[in-house]
Amino acid sequence: MKVVATTRNTPGTSASRSLRRAKQVPGVIYGGNGQPVNIAIEHNPLFHALRKEKFHASILDMELDGRSERVLLRDFQMHPYKPQVMHIDFQRVTEDKPIHMSVPLHFVGQENSPAVKESGGLISHVLSEVDIACLPKDLPAFIEVDLSGLRAHQTIRVRDLQLPAGVSPVLKGKENPVVASVSIKGEEIVEETAAPIVPAADVPATAQKLPPAAAAAPAPEKKGGDKDKEKKK
């Protein structure tokens, strides 16, 4: 995908406001072998590009003042309630240096899985994207997750994914997050109702209002005890 940008020589808040009034988006391009450069991009084409999944997980061709740059989208800010892009950041790509990206997951084969066809299970998509590291030439547009072999009570984790050659997941230590899991109808309800439920009417009113620790604690004895009662008599 292509992005057309121009260099802006007047950074600052007031200059950014002027750009936005002129239907331009202020931004910056950084990294690689060059210095950070303040840029401006036409708003409407950028706004529509941001609605495409590929724009967020692909290497982009940026035309900057007639020169060609290969970049990645790194961040952008939207107006709190208007459909307006306020600022955008891009990072230059160096072909021989690995990049770290979040890539979308595409789930396929769910309707053919034994978990659904045989057990009537429900497959939950726990993650919608995964962090990967690779060289720019190996960057996939998405990672496909095949659910066709998933059975009841099984899960698919990040380390189970079939990643393209040259691509590795970015994980810390023994971390292995769940990507998709299967739940069977009715089983969760049985677990929730296994413990006996005490009707509110059978619980003292004070215990209903107090935290468990406070409700369970015995009431403190009054100082003096029976001696005070004898004095009152």
Image (spheres, rainbow, N blue to C red):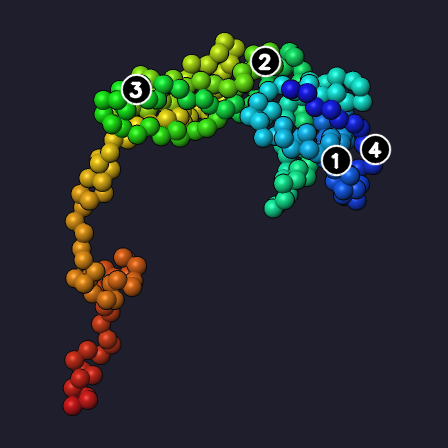
Q: Looking at the image, which residue is at 45% across and 22% down?
A: 106
Name above or below for residue 37 compared with residue 205. above
Mark number displayed over residue 113: 3
Residue, disc 2: 135
Q: Earlier in the sequence, mark 3 or mark 1?
A: 1
- Relative placement, left or right, of 138 versus 180 is right
Mark number displayed over residue 9: 4
- Relative placement, left or right, of 193 versus 103 is left
The answer, for residue 54, to whether it is visible in the render is yes
Q: Out of 201 and 3, give the one closest to the viewer.
A: 3
- The alpha-carbon separation of the residues under discs 2 and 4 comes to 33 Å
Residue, disc 1: 24
Foreground: disc 3 or disc 2: 3
Q: Looking at the image, which residue is at 58% across and 30% down?
A: 51
- Relative placement, left or right, of 173 versus 147 is right
Foreground: disc 2 or disc 1: 1
Name above or below for residue 2 compared with residue 218. above
**Badges 2 and 4: C-beta atoms under 8 Å apart?**
no
The image position of residue 166, as x and y in percent, is 52, 10
- The alpha-carbon separation of the residues under discs 2 and 1 comes to 32 Å
**Badges 2 and 1: C-beta atoms under 8 Å apart?**
no
Q: Name the amino acid, label 1.
A: Gln
- The alpha-carbon separation of the residues under discs 3 and 1 comes to 48 Å
Q: Earlier in the sequence, mark 2 or mark 1?
A: 1
Location of residue 108 (image quadrant) = top left
Element class at badge 4: loop
Q: Name the amino acid, label 2.
A: Leu
**Badges 3 and 2: C-beta atoms under 8 Å apart?**
no
